[in-house]
Amino acid sequence: MTDLVQTPGAPSPEPYGHSRTGLDPDSLRRGIVDHLRYSIGRPAAALRPEHYYRALALAVRDRMQDNRAASTQTSLDLGRKITCYLSAEFLMGPQLGANLLNLGIEGPAREALAELGQDIGEVLACEPEPGLGNGGLGRLAACYLDSLATLERPAIGYGIRYEFGIFDQEIRDGWQVEKTDNWLAQGNPWEIAKPDVSYLVRWGGFTEHTADGVRWVPGRVLKGVAYDTPIQGYGVRTCNVLTLWSARAVESFALEAFNTGDYYKAVEDEVTSETVTKILYPNDEPDAGKRLRLLQQYFFVSCSLQHVLHILDDLEGASLRELPERFALQLNDTHPSIGVAELMRLLVDERGLGWDEAWALTVRTFGYTNHTLLPEALETWPLAMFGESLPRHLEIVYEINRRFLDEVAARFPGDAERLRRMSLIGEDGDRSVRMAHLATVGSHAVNGVAALHSELLRHSVLADFAELWPERFSNKTNGVTPRRFVALANPGLRGLLDRTIGEGWLTDLDRLRGLEAFADDPAFQQEWQEVKRANKIRLADYVRETTGVELEPERLFDVQVKRIHEYKRQHLNVLHILTAYHRLKTTPGLEIPPRAFVFGGKAAPGYFLAKRIIKLITAVGDVVNNDPEVSPFLKVAFVPNFSVRNGQLIYPAADLSEQISTAGKEASGTGNMKFMINGALTIGTLDGANVEIREEAGPENFFLFGLTVPEVEELRRTGYRPADHVTGELAAVLDLLTDGTFGDPEVFRPLVDNLRHSDPFLVLADYASFVECQDRVDAAWRDRAGWTRMSILNAARSGKFSSDRAVAEYCDDIWNVGPVTVAGRP
Ligand SMILES: *Cc1c(COP(=O)(O)O)cnc(C)c1O
């Protein structure tokens, strides 16, 4: 087949058999061979699996680019509204498998590689994971991009192309060691650099107010360059885009327009400019690189908004006034919330709109998703630093605030205390800019990420705003994509579901309800157990390779994987293990159901207690796994470097999902959903989306323990004394940590002291309830048919937790965007 000349956007004239677009095995094979020759250029004798990976990735990207061109053209032709998802993090996971799945070419790719003597598993393993996020928030953004494309909604993800993503975690001597994640070292076949799509971003300096208006004379100018990654929908032609901005030094001629205050500083060498997108900062890091983090946020938001206005300029007959009809801008947490002030600056200073009109457009265009109630995680910037960095934006924030507080004062006359609480400027201690307030005031829609979280938002941190604008607030419970977290992660379950309820579940997860009819069917139960067992063997192999610990698949796999944080309470989980250990050691002949405790997760490099918790887990593992009296019943493994890739091995292998945060602290969680869809039972508190998981599964299929939010508040109000709980088994268990049983007592002293004397996350208050609940888990596990029934029912009732449902709600209630079908073959 000859290559046919195509104009961008025109449907592929002859997709079948074409080496760039054909979806059959032979076209794919020729696409791979072409790329090996023309894009990679290694002699045949020197080709290794990683070269086949790159060649296949490029061949797959060609097919997506064809769909991308058609999608762009369709959006332009129809002039339909585009959703822009602004997020400082996108935790995409490996792309090749997901793209093959969504294009419907897993089989053809396997065949094409086999023809070339390559094994697809080996080729898939060559892909480095782009770790451009910390955890749940970044992964949510990635799930939403998958759902937006699958639901055929035109969308752009906007973020930062970090040169180094989240660090790689190694475990040495039981401690976390951080290694830089050089994910771009071998190149990135998915992205297309667009040096012509670039914007200048100013920073620092001062403003001048003249008769002609405001002039911002920056101290520095840098340039953002777009890198586009296609985002293919499943089973549809729609292919959206993730645009990540990379910082560059500016050519000096480009600076003339700005007449910068300090020419030499403005033309700083590339090294300084490029550091802006050098590294992703870990969460929970006290004060790390604060100023650079603000610059990162402003940098990517400014580039993104300039790009949006640029697209709008290019649209036939569209004017600035149509911005809210043409674009929805969603703020994934406060990280991009400087966008509210930046859009005002662009509209007023650069486009000459009046303030009132610009403000109305801004509010109608932005939506804000809140992700945390933790006071230490609510973003604020010291006023002085903010003003030095973004002098014009500080003026704009002041003006937004002045008008806003006038509105509040008119609604609530004489309520100075309310004005103080609601101000965009925090006045307690050092003055600061409150980004959650800026995001709330500048958005027409504000949402939390689980029913309980949204409720708490309305009644705690944003209560005054909810009183002023009740209609702005809503809930959008998070979801996860079943393409990655079932079809890719759990091929055994995928096959069983296809055979049992048909293939439609992958885009309509509510169809899993069809499994309920089989929950008590012994033949189906048998198949269900076989799938789970195969997944456990697959994980056990991985755990053996990475840790040396042997986990027998007959054990109950009890799994807690997520960032290591005191509020997530991995240490409560450890206290249960220690309790079982203590019972085994002190009760001759005691038999309990054998368990494998699996942990995984990264701690922020500067988070002292979180790092001790990792050491605690590994130290307990070292003792328990090597004690012949105990190891038949208890094994403990810490899987290093928890990531999307190894998550795909871990979630499907779990029997029990640990979701044990202090009530009121976990906004939603999404790991909890991944476990449920894959048939794990949850042991959890009434926190985040656990509440809805329990509602959907039925309380009889969920292991509930612990204080509720009102009980937590009551306990705090009346004065919590952790020492009161240190009696009986708990006293014995805490003593184990400081009597040398698990090595140097000084290592765990800070953790134990923290629990005994302050225990901010109420670990000791929930201990007895947790242990009692774990005893119920043991009893339930002894009835294997009963457990299997509960497992099936959990999966059957997990449909709500698809990101397709979540994204459809955002589209209907906040973004007002409908589907746009792109013609041509899917
Ligand atoms: C889903 C996911 C998370 C979020 O887990 P939670 O249990 O909701 O905190 C974090 N990291 C990775 C790699 C994930 O896939």
Image (cartoon, rainbow, N blue to C red):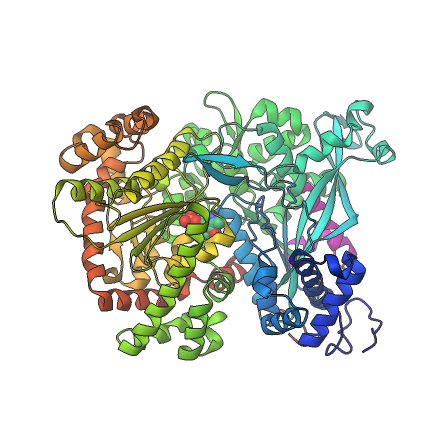
Q: Residue furthest right?
A: 253
Considering only vertical position in the picture, is 428 above or below 527?
above
Say whether residue 38 is magenta: no
Q: Residue furthest top?
A: 429
Q: Residue at x 79, y 66 (%)?
A: 8
- Is residue 516 visible in the rendered image? The answer is no
**Left or right: residue 724 compared with residue 649:** left
Q: Residue furthest front?
A: 45
Q: Residue at x 61, y 28 (%)?
A: 291
Where's the N terminus, which quadrant? bottom right
Q: Position of residue 148 (x, y in %)?
A: 57, 62
Considering only vertical position in the picture, is 545 above or below 743?
below
| Towards the viewer: 175 or 12 | 175
Where's the C terminus, which quadrant? bottom right
| Towards the viewer: 222 or 31 | 31
- The number of callouts visible is 0
**Left or right: residue 205 compared with residue 174:** right
Q: Residue at x 22, y 42 (%)?
A: 581
Task: State which quadrant residue 497 falls in.
Answer: bottom left
Query: Chief secondary structure of the magenta span?
Result: helix
Task: State which quadrant residue 732 falls in.
Answer: top left
Q: Position of residue 540 (x, y in %)?
A: 39, 55
Q: Position of residue 56 (x, y in %)?
A: 68, 63
- Is residue 797 visible in the rendered image? The answer is yes
Task: Give the residues in magenta.
Answer: 301-325
Q: Position of residue 289 (x, y in %)?
A: 58, 28
